[in-house]
Image: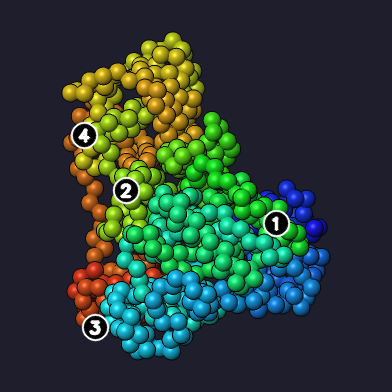
Amino acid sequence: MFSKILIANRGEIACRVIKTARQMGIATVAVYSDADRNALHVRMADEAVHIGPPAAAESYLVADKIITAAKDTGAEAIHPGYGFLSENAGFAKALETAGIAFIGPNVHAIEVMGDKIASKKFADAAKVNTVPGHLGVIADADEAVKIADQIGYPVMIKASAGGGGKGMRIAHGRDDVAEGFASSVSEAKSSFGDDRVFIEKFIVDPRHIEIQVLADKHGNVIHLAERECSIQRRNQKVIEEAPSPFLDPKTRKSMGAQAVALAEAVNYESAGTVEFIVDKERNFYFLEMNTRLQVEHPVTELITGIDLVEQMIRVAAGEKLAIKQSGVKLNGWAVESRIYAEDPYRNFLPSIGRLTRYQPPAEGVADGLTVRNDTGVYDGGEISMYYDPMIAKLCTHGPDRDAAIRHMSNALDGFYVDGIQHNIPFLSALMRHPRWIAGDITTNFIAEEYPDGFAPRLPDAEEADVIAVVAAVLDQSHNQRRRTITGQMSGDDVNFAIDRVVRFGGTIADRSMTVETVLDGMFIVHLKGEAERSISVASEWAPGDPVWRGDIDGRTVVVQVRTILNGYQLDTQGVSTTAQVLTIREAELSALMPEKIAPDTSNVLLCPMPGLVKAIHVSVGDHVQTGDALCVVEAMKMENILRAERDVTIGAVSASAGDSLAVDAVIMEFE
């Protein structure tokens, strides 16, 4: 077994590998760029080596720097994580030459399966069902249009060396192909250093289901069942679960057998994933094989009890698999939510900056339910514009799917992040969506259910009552703290039965109530009006805690709390609302106050996120129509095309290609 390994990656996956290596008694070496000097993976590793500037092309993608770091520190093996050099055959060959073990598959498997075009040709020759398409390299946009016309729309344009949704576009017509081809090529080159793309038929209403395989150097191959990854946005997975609620035992067995056969045919070793597209009739088609550890591997670990990173290390060290196919047992259900630094209220545009507050839910097992959080950040850390926007992967496990989903819902509500925008409200809303709960999902789910983008979910009457009660109890606790601290009166001697009005933002009706403190942390709230009733509340919350947890009439409730003037910003289960807690007189006067009017920005194009201007498509005096591309801004390895929202004439252009812009910087003005 190795005594020291180097992790050629960053962020949560580097931290994940370090944890297993530490449990195995293996020393670890981290590598880091200038932007990651204070990153969590650097702090966790036994040693750390600086490898260059922030840009991945000058640091994490430079094989020579990684190999030199391994030699200088005496690392005997390198784990590549995912992304970066994880599926780079040239890197694996260089490690062989240097006498350093690669914790991953052999070079042949990477070359055949890691290349999306070559893998489809290999799978087709091996009699594995494949999606119809053109497997050759495409020279230019004109050729792409001709090929797409022949295949029939819609089509998918994909980077040959791609993964994680990078370099991938869906085209519904000729114009989409021409534009999508250029974007795919550009993204592929910047993300993978390989600008080859191919085109295949896009299966309508598909489900994305993948099989985890595990193989050693002695010809033993097993599969660890499936993961469903159908909840995607822009071809980027958002929610994963294991097993799939859609597969029946017959289909599961058939897919597993095909995945194992494919791995055997390519003499695979280490952990890998065979991805399939599955249609409504459970017909499945080979999509690609990822010759690396997948982002979503924790859900497989939770239902099988098998540490995939440990198995990868043992296989790389030459050990035989100690697990037989008959020994793989599925236990319960697991769900993973990918938490990203992106603004769900602004079309999920990237967000960067300092994590002024980072408080994830506690990890561990309680009452048969598990919370696991794989992360690479910490309180006070920074989200950089140079890398993937993932903050964490939150996982829950329970005895069945319903339990895992309910536990995930509570865990998300207890995951507090401030300083940047993040997608936790969106994930929390998804956990309550009827289609998700029913398992009625496809890769089109988000586009179908949120065609106009995401907005906070409106609470129903019962939920509004609960939120109002929480706001009133928060106010009561704050008032008691204030009275005790000032010394002007004793909190124990004051009768805290007070009348309050909770005023929500938006169209939600006010709630009137009387709040009574029974004991420390116990309250009775008397709701007034048509739905008059008394509600018992118990909570150990103290002023300053960012998350309120308590029981309301015996039901567990978790709410994120942010203080505003005369009230709170409250977030729970996809509902995000302000709740002012007022005296009766304050409520009367507040109703007379005029509403603030937001400034008019309709005549300017503002940069929606910090990023690099890749291209300006218009000039002063140009007349553009609704939907025309105005410019391209790149952030976190993704190119974002900004389009005209109405017919306008360009009055001024303030930015140029190559400019780095802050959020809300003016790009151009309209006449």
Which residue is under mark 2? Answer: 435
Q: Nearer the viewer, mark 1 or mark 4?
A: 1
Which residue is under mark 3? Answer: 621
Q: Earlier in the sequence, mark 3 or mark 2?
A: 2
Cβ atoms at labels 1 and 2 below 8 Å apart: no
Counting from the top left corner in percent of width and height, residue 16 is at: 63, 53
The residue shown at (33%, 32%) is 467
Q: Nearer the viewer, mark 4 or mark 2?
A: 2
Q: Quadrant of residue 438?
A: top left
Counting from the top left corner in percent of width and height, residue 427 is at: 40, 49
In the image, is residue 592 above or below residue 1? above
In the image, is residue 117 above or below residue 467? below
In the image, is residue 34 above or below residue 324? below
The residue shown at (77%, 55%) is 27
Q: Nearer the viewer, mark 4 or mark 3?
A: 4
Q: Is disc 2 placed on a helix, strand or loop?
A: helix
Q: Earlier in the sequence, mark 4 or mark 3?
A: 4
Cβ atoms at labels 1 and 4 below 8 Å apart: no
